[in-house]
Image (cartoon, rainbow, N blue to C red):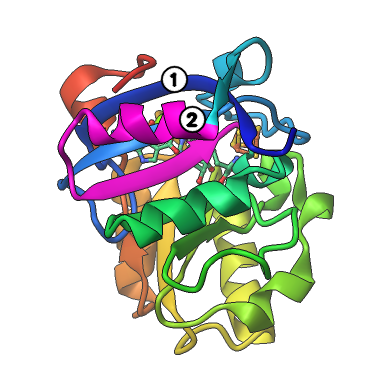
Amino acid sequence: MSERLRITEIFHSLQGEARTVGLPTVFVRLTGCPLRCHYCDSEYAFYGGEYREMDEVIASVQSFGARHVCVTGGEPLAQKACIPLLQKLCDLGYQVSLETSGAMDISDVDPRVSRVVDIKTPDSGEVDKNRWQNLPLLTTNDQIKFVLCSRQDYDWARMICDHHQLWDKTELLFSPSFQQLPLKSLAEWILADRLPVRMQVQLHKFIWGDVPGH
Ligand SMILES: C[S@@+](CC[C@H](N)C(=O)[O-])C[C@H]1O[C@@H](n2cnc3c(N)ncnc32)[C@H](O)[C@@H]1O
Ligand SMILES: Nc1nc2[nH]cc(C(=O)O)c2c(=O)[nH]1
Ligand code: SF4
Ligand SMILES: [Mg+2]
């Protein structure tokens, strides 16, 4: 039954992260994740959830009347039916993004989807899970994100961008781990080093705090 999805929540909010930040977006949060990042703000999506038919999920998305859909989790690509879900959303004309740890193979994702691949840093505790074979597959329609916990993470992210020549490959997002790395520190490091990256903060947490469903 690969056309069923295990869903934690479907909600309407302002996109808080990445390239379409600030735009009204429907979020589909799939349940379950094989990783355990120390900073994870979505632990409530590790377990539980409800199995829903694909058509039901699509109808729920449509009920909000938004143009943008963000499929997230948990780890969305850990569910087989994520691939057809993304394709159906694109066919319906939505602007679709996918938030993924990049620990799973991204090659079957519909090319119309903007894949936001989070490269896990040493201080996430999950650096060994990075699937480096994903990087050559990325295009300018995709995005790479580093969630940074420390100066050591920042230096590591720079080194990875050099090593894999990511600077001109696609958009690079440097995001502070929420309330762990001071915003001003990260801003000043980026400016001092003249890094061509976008610093991103999680807009929704400034508006609503760190609560589910926003
Ligand atoms: C909850 S995850 C779900 C998608 C996928 N599992 C992943 O890690 O990309 C969505 C995004 O939120 C980021 N995130 C989670 N907790 C965070 C925190 N405390 N501060 C900043 N970003 C965080 C993740 O790194 C990831 O980029
Ligand atoms: N508003 C809002 N924007 C988001 N962008 C990515 C999110 C996520 O949890 O993946 C997220 C989220 O949880 N809320
Ligand atoms: S991969 Fe994503 S959902 Fe899983 S623990 Fe890390 S941040 Fe949380
Ligand atoms: Mg979130």
* Residue at 32% in and 66% down: 198
Question: Horizontally, is 78 left or right of 177 in the view?
Answer: right
Q: Position of residue 186 (x, y in %)?
A: 38, 54
Residue 69 part of the magenta segment: yes
Q: Which of 157 and 96 is in front in this view?
A: 96
Residue at the limit of the structure toward the top, as seen here: 48
Give the answer, above or below, for where 133 lies relative to 145: below
Name the element at disc 1: strand
Residue at the limit of the structure toward the right, as seen here: 128
Give the answer, above or below, for where 106 lies relative to 185: below
Question: Horizontally, is 134 left or right of 54 in the view?
Answer: right
Circle 2 sits on which residue? 29
Circle 1 sits on which residue? 9
Name the element at disc 2: strand
Residue 45 part of the magenta segment: no
Q: Nearer the viewer, residue 86 or 13?
A: 86
* Residue at 34% in and 18% down: 213
Which of the image's four quarters has the C terminus? top left
Q: Position of residue 168 (x, y in %)?
A: 45, 89
Mark 2 vs 1, N-terminal side: 1
Residue 143 in which image quadrant: bottom left
Ligand 2 near label 2 (Cβ, under 8 Å)? yes
Residue 209 in which image quadrant: top left
The image's mark for residue 196 is none
* Residue at 35% in and 79% down: 196
The magenta-colored residue range is 54-74
**Label 2 environment density (alpha carbons within 10 Å; few <14, some 14–19, many ≥20):** many
Which of the image's four quarters has the N terminus? top right
* Residue at 49% in and 73% down: 111
Question: Horizontally, is 41 left or right of 4 in the view?
Answer: left
**CB-based contact (under 8 Å), mark 2 and mark 1:** yes
